[in-house]
Image (spheres, rainbow, N blue to C red):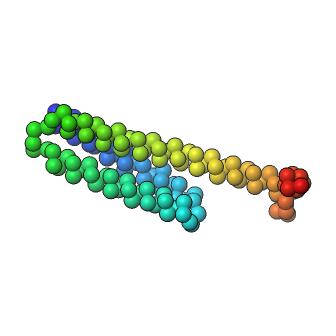
Amino acid sequence: MALVFCAMISVGMAGLLASHAPIRAILGMVGPGLLRRKWRGLSVLIVQFLLAFPAFAYLRLGTPLTVADFVAAFILMTGGVFVLVVARLSLATTKDFVRIATLEREALRDPLTGVFNRRYLDTKL
């Protein structure tokens, strides 16, 4: 039973560790400002959450594991996987927003001169 407990803790930790790659990619796309600070703050929270996993395992191993321990380990495991899934979805969404913004900018400017084109003037009028 201790092996299952440790496996759940390990899967949750792996999910949290893996979530840092998409968050770093998002930080590379986001300019300075409030949004960047919020993503950094989320990264700090994930590290703090990550520290709870070994602490919980350390406190519970060596004692008889209860159903509540397995429920808590399951919640931690699914929490880690949830953070990873949300980080990956956020990265995909960020990439889409950057792509759309680039397409919109290119659609409103002349590629040679960089001046706004007729489409831009039509929307402003």
Residue 81 vs 45, above or below: the answer is: above
| Left/right of residue 23 with respect to residue 33 in the rendered view | left
Q: Residue at x 53, y 54 (%)?
A: 26
Q: Nearer the viewer, residue 111 or 118?
A: 118
Question: Residue at image x 10%, y 38%?
Answer: 64
Measured from the top left, where is residue 4 in percent x and y? 21, 34
Q: Is residue 56 something that shows in the picture?
A: yes
Q: Position of residue 12 (x, y in %)?
A: 32, 43
Q: Is residue 31 above or below residue 103?
A: below
**Left or right: where 2 falls relative to 20:** left
Which residue corresponds to the image point at 18% horizontal and 33% vertical from the top-left?
67
From the image, which quarter does the N terminus lie in?
top left
Q: Is residue 11 visible?
A: no
Q: Position of residue 55 (x, y in %)?
A: 21, 52
Q: Residue at x 42, y 57 (%)?
A: 43
Name the one closer to the observer, 3 or 53: 53
Position of 76 with respect to 121 (left or right) is left
Q: Is residue 79 above or below residue 21?
A: above
Q: Quadrant location of the C terminus?
A: bottom right
